[in-house]
Image (cartoon, rainbow, N blue to C red):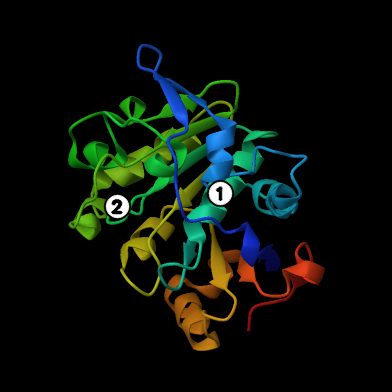
Amino acid sequence: MTMITVGKEDFVAQTSPCTIVDLERRRVRLDREKLLENGIFGLEHMDPRARTFILLRSQIMNGFYAEGGRILVVTSTQAGNGKTFVTANLACALSLIQPTVLIDLDLRRPTMATRFGLTVNAGVDDYLLGDCEWEDVGQKVAGLDLTLYPVREPRQDSSTLLSLDRLAGAMTAIRAMPYQPLCIIDTPPALVLDDVMLIARKGDGIVMVIEEGRTTSGELKEAMRLLGAPRIVGTVLNKSMTSGTRRYDYDYYEPA
């Protein structure tokens, strides 16, 4: 298992509109200045803040993806640990070298559309309800190997929707894509809802986001018990208090 550290000053919570939507082609052009305001700098390979995600990208490509993994689930123990921040930046960094799909499955508290400034006419929630097809949801980012699958509106019946066969159908469609994209999924916290357990069954591995000074060892152990420690392929230490000297250090260890 791999741990990577993200500096506390790297985490940005506010969001700003950042796309122009071409509805005819269902593509979006991202405004990179607005993305930076929203804390998304994974596309900026010269930005020092992106180095963390470039290193994590290399670990995932050389390990998880090289060994046949295609669908990677990202979660945390509690809300506010920074999992969506990590998910968005990791997907952006990956898309610079690898076809990447980013799916928002945090159905009760979806934020991906806001972070990327997307106009959502058909969302993942609509697909799960049977109101549209999977290909109607994806928004290809112009100039990048990145396709975004956002949620249109929050759904309180998230567990019911995620239990439907349509989720498995979406994962099958992704695995069947000829260009073999790496799929990153943003999910709810593991100790808040059972949603992530429903999602993780369809994936190939899990990345756990840990917030320094907040995530307890007990919470982490309980999350690993619920999800299955062997399925967790790595951890990310977010909002690190020691980022001035250790921002990009890795720590390799085996799960207990």
Label 2 crowd bin: few (<14), some (14–19), many (20+), radius 10 Å: many
Q: Which mark is residue 39?
A: 1
Residue furthest out toward the top:
24
Foreground: 6 or 68? 6
Taking the spot 65% from the left edge, 53% from the top edge, the residue there is: 64
155 horizontally vs 70: left or right: left
Q: Which mark is residue 68?
A: none
Percent coordinates x, y for residue 123 in the rendering: 29, 36
Residue furthest out toward the bottom:
218
Percent coordinates x, y for residue 75 in the rendering: 47, 63
The answer to which of marks 1 and 2 sits earlier in the sequence is 1
Percent coordinates x, y for residue 165 in the rendering: 26, 46
Taking the spot 35% from the left edge, 16% from the top edge, the residue there is: 23
Taking the spot 70% from the left edge, 76% from the top edge, the residue there is: 254
* Callout 2 amino acid: Leu
Taking the spot 67% from the left edge, 64% from the top edge, the residue there is: 7
- Where, by quadrant of the figure, is residue 46 drawn? top right
**Residue 161 visible in the current orientation:** yes
Percent coordinates x, y for residue 167 in the rendering: 32, 45
- Where disc 2 sits, the SS reads loop
32 horizontally vs 148: left or right: right
For residue 28, above or below residue 192? above
Q: Which mark is residue 107?
A: 2
**Residue 71 visible in the current orientation:** no
For residue 141, above or below residue 79? above
* Callout 1 amino acid: Gly
147 horizontally vs 170: left or right: right
- Where, by quadrant of the figure, is residue 26 drawn? top left
Foreground: 93 or 67? 93
Label 1 crowd bin: few (<14), some (14–19), many (20+), radius 10 Å: many
- Where disc 1 sits, the SS reads loop
Q: Quadrant of the C terminus?
A: bottom right
